[in-house]
Amino acid sequence: MSMATVGIIGTGMFVPSNVLTNADVQQYVDTTDEWIRTRTGILERRIAAPDEATSDLAVVAAQRAMEQAGVGAADIDCIIVATMTPDMMCPSTACLVQARIGAHRAAAFDLSAACSGFVYALAMASQCIATGMYRHVLVIGAEVLSRVTDYTDRNTCILFGDGAGAVVLGPTDAGRGFRAFSLGADGHGAPLLRGGCVGGSRYPSEQHLPEGMTRCIWQNGKEVFKFAVRTLEQQTIAVLAKAGLTIADLDMLVPHQANVRIIDAAVEKLRLDPQKVFVNIASYGNMSAATIPIALAEAQSLGRLRAGHTVVLVGFGGGLTWGAAALVW
Ligand code: UT7
């Protein structure tokens, strides 16, 4: 089976109902709606209820994607959950989802590549289908970042939100589906962005943390910003080139949504028509691995993705990591 016959056959998303507006954030930290809007493009984010965990969001998004794909739980061969905020270290969030949706035949595991995780997971899943190992793989990006956000730090608490997006990958008609992937990492950039630092083998509990370090998300915003603009531009070109295409062939770019200024700067460098870029950061903020699948599900339900469209997905984030996929919708 060639790569071109594996594609996305269903999308779904779920976000918690609780909305945190910029006016709400002003109650916690010294900031303004004007600053947040103009510096990030974010107007509001969704925040999980205290009893809602990542698997709870993932299950609903997955069920919606399966319904759209017309694929039942018994037909799912594998579940991959990309997340940096799993319910717990073990069992994996994917196993919790597997039990809840009744996908009893499915292998299940989590994948850790921060904001690039969903695209990494697509690459792994599509190879499993292309080689004939599996037929249907459920790929989910899900996060409850509010659990690792410091709501006294104005540099970070304005940015993050909670949500889940899912897709079902399966065989598609010839001429549609994935054309190329481009994945990468630079572990030397690890100190630039971290989160969820407690509970691993380095810092098993809060009291093991070095002075000045917290369990919450921390980043060198300026450095990550420059990396993000560079990566978004370069990876879009790189994955199109791998697919034998150029920017002129692109119908829809679905980038990771970390800051609207990152997207605008990269789109300008690419000389891409802004109409061909999907942006929904205003409503959700940055949801790490959940951002791209939620954007895809929204773009599809809004009729922005049509059969035959050439689409590029690009993620970038902690690790540092990056990943891009080129596909024909
Ligand atoms: O998905 C993972 C990848 N993450 C990213 O891609 C994030 C990339 N970085 C960014 O999006 C931006 O760097 C931020 C949004 C995090 C920050 O925006 P910035 O334009 O780079 O601001 P800055 O950090 O350079 O700060 C400028 C000023 C500072 O004041 P001084 O030191 O110049 O007096 C900050 O203290 O803005 C201040 N500031 C704020 N003011 C009001 C920082 N955060 C806020 C705030 N409200 N929330």
Image: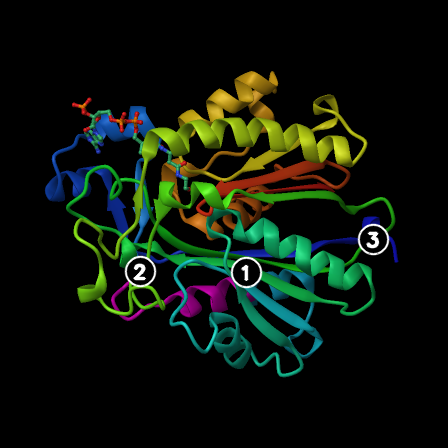
The amino acid at mark 1 is Ile
Mark 2 closeness class: few <14, some 14–19, many ≥20 residues within 10 Å: many
Q: Disc 3 to disc 2, how far (Cα)? A: 37 Å
Residue on which disc 2 sits: 48
Q: Are discs 3 and 1 less than 8 Å apart at CB?
A: no
Q: Position of residue 321 (x, y in %)?
A: 52, 45
CB within 8 Å, label 3 to label 2: no
Q: Is residue 285 visible?
A: no
In magenta stretch: residue 159: no
Give the number of the disc on residue 140.
Answer: 1
Q: Of residues 264 and 279, which is closer to you in this image?
A: 264
Q: Marks 3 and 1, Cα distance to the nearest angstrom?
A: 20 Å
Q: Is residue 225 left or right of residue 26?
A: right
Amino acid carrying mark 2 in the image: Ala
Circles 2 and 1 in contact, beta carbons < 8 Å: no
- The magenta span reads 48-62
Question: Where is residue 251 shown, x and y percent of the image?
Answer: 68, 30
**Quadrant containing the N terminus in the rendered view:** bottom right
Q: Which of the pair 33/232 is nearer the observer?
A: 232
Q: Give the alpha-carbon distance from disc 2 to disc 1, as whole Å.
A: 17 Å
- Relative image position of residue 261 (x, y in whole percent): 41, 25
Residue at mark 3: 5
Residue 274, image x, y percentages? 55, 22
